[in-house]
Amino acid sequence: AQSVTQLGSHVSVSEGALVLLRCNYSSSVPPYLFWYVQYPNQGLQLLLKYTTGATLVKGINGFEAEFKKSETSFHLTKPSAHMSDAAEYFCAVSGNAGGTSYGKLTFGQGTILTVHP
Amino acid sequence: DVKVTQSSRYLVKRTGEKVFLECVQDMDHENMFWYRQDPGLGLRLIYFSYDVKMKEKGDIPEGYSVSREKKERFSLILESASTNQTSMYLCASRVQGARGKLFFGSGTQLSVL
């Protein structure tokens, strides 16, 4: 079984401030981890993903995330927020081994990011 | 670019009707998914399909069924629509394998009255 918990349904930051969106996962097998973003009135698109190798992964638009196995976390960060970052962000997990979780992608509840001028 | 097309952007149906939501992708992807998106609940997986004629239940399959007769098309069927199935429905596809990224359609907002 697998699950994702995003801490904080709404996060508000000032333009130029650090963005930190929290994601914790549960998986019975080694995970693949993803962050997707949904801009207003647009479809979801992939921001970044962790599969294997380096635990710090970089994505589009200056975002990055670090896989921490000991903490079962995959938090998303950006050093300096921009107004255009306002969107809803979803963390997702997929099992990378056999079994019923393989291939099934489970999403978290989403975090709405608001950026103030 | 990969294109995932959902047949309707908005749909209004009555309680008890049988509803078909269609999804077509043009990149020969093996895997296809149906999610519903509700505020505060994120995306919840209804069904997914590894390949033609193959399907797996997701987390909330009750009240839904699916059909995948051709590789490019994945249909979601609401056997008898109910008001609690009012939601945004998202279709997605990807190449075979769990590490690939999902390509999403623009969604169908279904209202059941």
Image: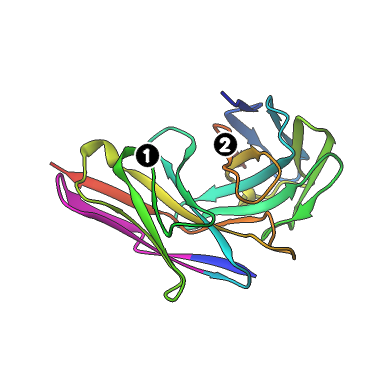
The residue lying at 19 percent from left, 52 percent from top is A13
Instruction: Pick the residue in front: A56 or A65.
Output: A56
Name the quarter where the N terminus of chain A is drawn: bottom right
Q: Can you say whether B14 is above or below A96 in the image?
A: above
Q: Look at the image and say whether residue A7 sits in the magenta stretch.
A: yes
B14 left or right, relative to A19: right
Residue A99 higher or lower than A115, as above or below: below
* Residue B61: quadrant of the picture: bottom right
Q: Quadrant location of residue B32?
A: top right
Q: Are dots 2 and 1 on a single chain?
A: no
- State which mark lies toward you, 2 or 1: 1
Residue at left offset 68%, top offset 52%: B46
**A44 relative position to B64: left or right:** left
- Looking at the rendered structure, the secondary structure element under dot 1 is helix
Task: Write down the chain letter for disc 1.
Answer: A
Neighbour tally class for label 2: few under 14, some 14-19, many 20 plus, Cα within 10 Å: many
Q: Distance between the residues labelled 2 and 1?
A: 17 Å
Query: x%, y% of residue B31?
Result: 72, 42
Residue A24 in the image, given as x and y percentages of width and height: 44, 68
Say whether marks 2 and 1 touch (CB < 8 Å). Answer: no
Looking at the rendering, the stretch of residues picked out in magenta corresponds to A5-25
Residue B109 visible in rendering: no
- Amino acid marked by disc 1: Ile
Q: Nearer the viewer, residue B30 or B104?
A: B30
Give me the disc on residue A60: 1
Q: Main secondary structure of the magenta part?
A: strand
Q: Is residue A98 magenta?
A: no
Residue B43 visible (yes or no): yes
